[in-house]
Amino acid sequence: MGYYEYFQFAEDLGAMPLPVVPAMVTGCGEDQATDDPELLQRHIQDTLDLIEFANGPADSEWGGLRAEMGHPEPFGLTHVQVGNEENLPDAFFERFEQYRDAVEAEYPGITVISNSGPSSGGAVFERAWELNRQHDVELVDEHYYNSPEWFLANNERYDSYDREGPDVYLGEFASQGNRFSNALAEAAYMTGLERNADVVKMASYAPLLAAEWDTQWTPDMIWFDNSTSWGSANYEVQRLFSANTGDRVVPSTASGTPGVGGPITGAVGLSTWNTSAEYDDVRVTSAEGETLLTDDFSSGADQWSHITDAGNWAVENGAYVQTETSGENTMVTAGDSGWTDYDLEVTATKREGAEGFLVGFGVQGTGDYYWWNLGGWNNTQTAVERASGGAKSLVVADDTTVEAGRAYDIRIGVRGRDVTLYLDGQEWDSFTAPTPEPFRQVVTRDEQTGELIVKVVNARGEAARTSVDLGGTRVEPTAQATVLHADPAAENTATDRPVSPETSTVDGVDSSFTHTFPAHSITFMRLKPQD
């Protein structure tokens, strides 16, 4: 698919095209910058030529080529993005400024979009946003693929964004799966996007299209094979939100909606990622001072069990050593999955390899744990990550790196959902794990029809009998409700669509009424104003 076909595709769909051009800094979280001024200028000129190809008159050089290809009218391009998930914000902005200056000089009506790196937080994200603010960027593209739990727990993410700073284009987001439970979490999160529509100007789910025989992962919106195409559960959510957007957000609140988060609970773990490392003097103590685990590996490592197939662990000279420099998660665990409120202490040393070492806590299994990833991402930063259902999300991070051959004293204190982390006796960071909230709502108004559009997500396993109070607003006694309701594990396939919307009429609607929102459901209710 070339640019011409891409613009045609967007035009046929009634969608907005947004081409992304290379910034000459490797994207997708890599760490290289191309220092070739002539090559940079060539790419900047290519970007200007692309805009002329999309929008130029038929008698211009590139607009003429478009006309010759069969589309004499301009495509109406309004936005261009420079770069994609760069991991070197300073190098990126040195080049971004040159792109933006060139585009604004020749095409002042085109919005040039920047980005904030490959994740929802961390040192790269924070530095990128700092530079976006300094450079008065109009629109910043954020990308993140996180767990359903993260989406349920971070609905308020954009509530605190600076309304005087750059706006957000959420250009890639998904909850790493095509089950209805994933779609429910995404829908809950989208109520927060709509509530913050003054700062989140645009959003696009990703990936959009997936060939059944060749995919990298599964949070894809529309699947196809050689004979048919079908929308995933995630697609049904996106489609219903797009068809029920409204024009203005109506302030609304929900009360009595309990979260589902208890204390951080689980065993402890040791792991590596493309690195050989050794561990010694492990000690776990309860909040009351009781010793839960102690191991100096002088008598072997019988207390530890492997939960992955990667790595080669052995006791060497009184330390527990993972000797291979390959393998992306070599975790071994010890202790009780029911542990809460404890302190974990361990000494860790990197031997050799690309990264540092990882210390797990709250470990429930291969796909459910927290870990402190020291010297991760090719030893460029340190972070706490939360894995839920096999999907990892960043919790806190900075640019701490790890030296090979140096012993680090690590302590992690867990109290309820509060965690404090110490490195060599100094507090490195702390956080409170957000509580997943499975009941979310947002209300918008359709200015043309006057309808209130009430959108409610109930991701709980039980129905929610709910009082709806419109504050005296008079509405018609019947309303249209479109509901997605399915088993959380349901997935749409080429031959089966268990996640499909159903539309019905709701009676008994008034300025105050009661309605039951089914378990595991997403409801779009349109309330008509009374004449």
Image: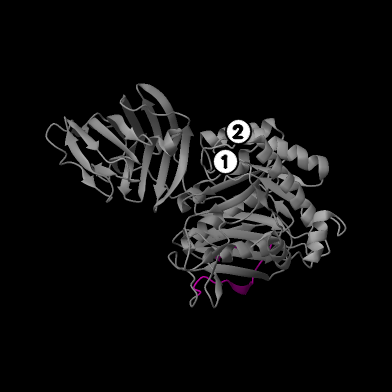
For residue 502: magenta?
yes
The CA span between labels 2 and 1 is 9 Å
Residue 86 tag number: 1
Q: From the viewer's perspective, is residue 398 above or below residue 186?
A: above
Kindly tell me whether residue 515 is visible in this rendering: no
The mark nearer the N terminus, 2 or 1, is 1
Q: Where is residue 477 in the image (x, y as percent from the top left)?
A: 69, 69
Q: In which quarter of the image is the C terminus?
A: bottom right
Q: What stretch is highlighted in magenta?
A: 497-516
Q: Quadrant of the N terminus?
A: bottom right
In what element is the residue under mark 2? helix
Please identify the residue farthest to the top as the structure is shown.
425
Q: Residues within 10 Å of mark 2 (few under 14, many from 20)?
A: some
Q: From the viewer's perspective, is residue 455 above or below residue 293?
A: below
Please identify the residue farthest to the right as the structure is shown.
59
Q: Do the residues labelled 2 and 1 touch (CB within 8 Å)?
A: yes
Q: Residue at x 17, y 41 (%)?
A: 303
**In the rendered view, does 113 fall on the left or right side of 366?**
right
Which residue position holds label 2?
91
Looking at the rendered structure, the kind of residue marked 1 is: Glu
Kindly tell me whether residue 129 is visible in this rendering: yes
Q: Position of residue 311 (x, y in %)?
A: 27, 45
Looking at the rendered structure, the kind of residue marked 2 is: Ala
Q: Position of residue 433 (x, y in %)?
A: 44, 40
For residue 190: magenta?
no
Q: From the viewer's perspective, is residue 129 above or below residue 522?
A: above
Please identify the residue farthest to the front as the structure is shown.
38
